[in-house]
Image (cartoon, grey):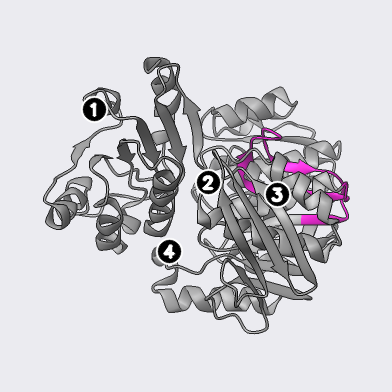
Amino acid sequence: MNINQFTYYYFIGIGGIGMSAVARYFHQMNKKVMGYDKTSTTLTKLLTKEGIKIHFEDTLEAIPKALTPDNTLVIYTPAIPKNHLELNYFKDNNYNIIKRSEALGYITQETTCLAVAGTHGKTTTSSLLGHILKVANLPSTAFLGGIVENYNSNIIIGGNEISVVEADEFDRSFLQLSPDYACITSMDADHLDIYGDQSEMEKSFLEFASIVKKQVFAKTGLNVPGALSYGVEEKADYFADNIQIKADYFIFDLTHPQGKIETIPMHLPGRHNIENAVGAIAMAMKMNVAENKIKEALDSFQGIKRRFTRHKTSSGKIIIDDYAHHPTELNAIIRATQNFYPNKSVTAVFQPHLFSRTRDFLDDFAQSLAVLEDLIILEIYPAREEPIPGITSSLLAEKIELINDKKPKVCSLENALREISHYDNDIILLMGAGNIDTLYEPLKNKIQ
């Protein structure tokens, strides 16, 4: 199938972070893009403003009469329920129907594909890579899992010869891709509801590495046959050294097989982001990006929404919002906060994401969060899941108390602002992948 042959592109679940990037891709190609989502969000409002028609009721009456099986491609997310009226209409009438991962698979077949996989770090690494290629004026498009501040978008459009793709391991979606180069940022256990255990998940990553046509890069410590390593350790093929922390940014050198790039500036916090930057630079070098363009891109990269997004109030207090929802990510964000603000007190607010993840990593979450002096835990955000008996935020709080003799406060999202107001710390740190980000703007308005 030639994925570009259709007139209409109909998205079911168009408001998702990954789906909306693909929708924007076809929209910029002057295709007629439209679709359904369950609820109106900031992202769907942006899509509508860009000229994409979206409705929020699952009804056949919303499907335009002009759509036929010959002129329309239907793209859907697996999160859509099986009894969805519109999806079943398209199935019953023999429309071309594919998942988002399959759409990306077709796109990557027609381009030089740079794919970034990993349970943590893939959004930042792929966004940095997409920005580097854009600054270097290479004909590329980056499909991302976050909103890049420089573009206020989850897609960076600069041409159709190179694709940068955030390769999602969730349901083995990344095996649909056709990567020429790939980077694996991490293989920590996650999505155990899908994989069962970590060894099965690692097998999936190794299978992904095996389909890469030219070169795989893997963070130091990951056992990926044939991969070039990167990181902050000197034993890596690509590594950062001479790392310096300035006022609120890093400067580092990068040693690579052909030499060294000196004094690279980067405004993202945390050692983990230096590793992400090294991975992005290693892949960009395979596209022959000039050294000065790499440094220009790293210096100008403004970050990703909900990845250590910071706001300083007029009173000097700092609000940080981050997507961290796995113990490894919590460790990285807490460490970054401590490194950048070593003498400031912190009120941390964590919203667990998924009952299954909370169950699978309960002890690890407790160890990560026990280092925090003032901690509020919100009720578990269920997303696609039903509650699991006995798995609650209160259970997590009890586990933390066993470690540090201090039981965190547990409350609902609705009561969070009131609970936060009981603390008078320098920093408010919001962490979680659910809807905890809805506290960010109210906090900015409340704390002047």
Q: Secondary structure at mark 4?
A: loop
Instruction: Determine if the magenta segment contains residue 226.
Output: no
Q: Amino acid at mark 1?
A: Tyr
Residue 438 position by quadrant: top left
Residue that protrudes farthest toward the bottom in the picture:
225
Whether label 4 touches label 3, CB < 8 Å: no
Q: Earlier in the sequence, mark 1 or mark 2?
A: 2
Residue 333 shown left or right of residue 148 in the figure: left
Residue ID at (42%, 22%): 316
203, above or below 352, in the image: below
Q: Earlier in the sequence, mark 4 or mark 1?
A: 4
Question: Within 10 Å of the Cα at label 1, are there few (<14), some (14-19), or many (20+) other Cα atoms?
Answer: few
Tell me the magenta residue range.
Answer: 137-163
What residue would you read off at disc 4? Answer: 190
What residue would you read off at disc 3? Answer: 143
Frontmost residue, 351 versus 390: 351
Residue ID at (45%, 48%): 336
Residue 171 appears at what percent x and percent y? 53, 63
Camera-side mark, 4 or 1: 1
Residue 99 visible in the displayed image: no
Camera-side mark, 3 or 1: 1
Q: Amino acid at mark 4?
A: Asp
Residue 319 appears at what percent x and percent y? 42, 30
* The label number, if any, that marks residue 269 in the structure image: 2
Quarter placement of the C terminus: top left
Q: What's the distance in space between the residues labelled 1 and 2, CA to CA?
A: 25 Å
What residue would you read off at disc 1? Answer: 423
Frontmost residue, 93 versus 159: 159
Residue ID at (67%, 47%): 265
